[in-house]
Amino acid sequence: MRGFRFLAVCHGLVLLSGVVQAAEMPTCTSVEFRGDGPGVLTPAEDWEKILVLYAEVKRGLLAWLEKNRSNFSEKVSAFIESQILTIKLERAPITNNPDLTWRGIGVFAYDGKSPMIRLGSGFAYLAAVQPERAKFELTRLMIQSFLPCEIHRAMGEATSGVGVDEHTAQVWAPLLKCLQVSDSQGCGNGSYSESGWAISSTVAAVVSPPGCMLPVFKNPELARCMEVRR
Amino acid sequence: MKKAKTVDIIFALTLASVVGCVTAEKKAEKVEAGEKIPFVEAYIEFLGPNEKWAGPSTYLLHVNANESRDDLVQIEISPELLEFEKPSVIEPTQRKKEKNPAILNRVLASKTSEKINQKIAQKRLNELALAMQEEDVSFEACLSPLKVRMTRVDGKVFEKEGCRGVDGWPKKASELSSQLIQEKLKN
């Protein structure tokens, strides 16, 4: 049971801090369960379990923000805090994205101006049998509410770097460079975001470790993005 | 067998994408909104992220309502939904007890309960195509992209990319997908 303490420092941003058993850690794979379709409400008992995870994730993200608040401008950290505090969960069955009632983890969306996670019907099964992984997935979805382009979109910052204000871009730039991720389209209309997956997955792994190693960190070259201390 | 079918669908989509590079440029003049020629085939692709992030996997729905011999609608889903089986620790009957139709969108509920024959499938495809043609839905830095490629009975093609979670035609694509999945599961 040899333990490694991972501490990744990215422009002062504490990304990973915790003891993991690297040797025994399985590789994370895509996981999702089939839902019950559009006619079935997530049972109250299952929903309560999800709400417990949701509260834990909020606390975890707020704690992460406190550790890293100094890295963000006051305006941006206030926005991130607001997103964490106000983001809502939509209980299955999802009427706006009914394909989620059959499969899928969930999607980040807006309900008017309020950030929202639309959970797939199969998420309750994931929470029942793999709560650690479910918590990771929920965390990853909630982080999508304050990704750089969300900050850009919500706050109307001048476009530069990856499409957000320069300060926020600089916070994430070392991590994205190390992971060899770049979004050529920035935050433009009709763009897709690989950096969004990189940031949300990495921070989610810190806040809510999934109990497995993301495939990206199995790559020795990319694993060097993290400084390893025994 | 299932794997071969999956490969076939992926190959077909890849081929369709390659062809699309040529035809997409001409789509504005080839497929006009409001034309009465029906759409008979669609590929709806929900794209997952790169495998290295271990996110939700890509899945693809293919519907073909152009079989002239009978009234059947061909629906293929890749990967098959059965690959996402429910864990056995939860009794399905326990979950079925708690239905709450009151919270459901009534239109959606009525659409999902109907049997999808060729005529209905073509009507749904035309509704989606019209929405795709008329709505200019904006999105940025999308993490859950959606691609739809539709073919008319005369072979002309229309395609568009969007983002899940965004209102407008992506919602209609999601509704159609849900109906097709339900229909597939009936058979």
Image: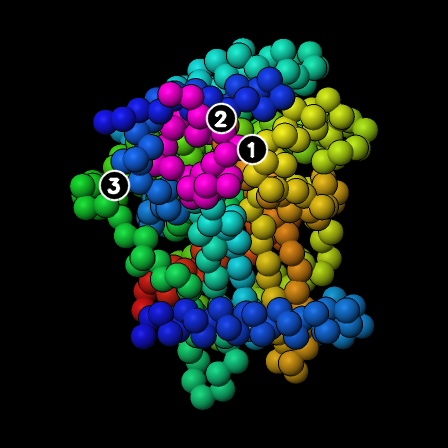
Tag 1: amino acid: Ile
Q: Are marks 2 and 1 in contact (CB under 8 Å)?
A: no
Name the image quarter holding residue A131: top left
Residue A21: x and y, percent? Answer: 30, 29
Q: What is the chain letter for disc 1?
A: A
Mark 2 → mark 1, Cα distance in angstroms = 17 Å
| Residue hosting label 2 | A227
| Residue hosting label 3 | B95
Tag 2: amino acid: Glu
Helix, strand or loop status at disc 1: helix
**Foreground disc of the pair 2, 3:** 2
Q: Residues within 10 Å of mark 2 (few under 14, many from 20)?
A: few
> Is there any visible trace of residue A32 in the rendered image?
yes
What residue appears at the point 70 percent right and 70 percent down from the top-left corner?
B21
Name the image quarter holding residue A129: top left
Tag 3: amino acid: Arg
Helix, strand or loop status at disc 2: strand
Q: What is the chain letter for disc 2?
A: A
- Left or right, A68 with respect to B134, comes to left
What residue appears at the point 73 percent right and 30 percent down from the top-left corner?
A164
Q: The magenta stretch spans which residues?
A: A204-230
Residue B97: x and y, percent? Answer: 24, 41
Say whether mark 1 and mark 2 are on the same chain. Answer: yes
Mark 3 → mark 1, Cα distance in angstroms = 35 Å
Specify whether residue B100 is painted magenta: no
| Residue hosting label 1 | A199
> Is there any visible trace of residue B32 in the rendered image?
no
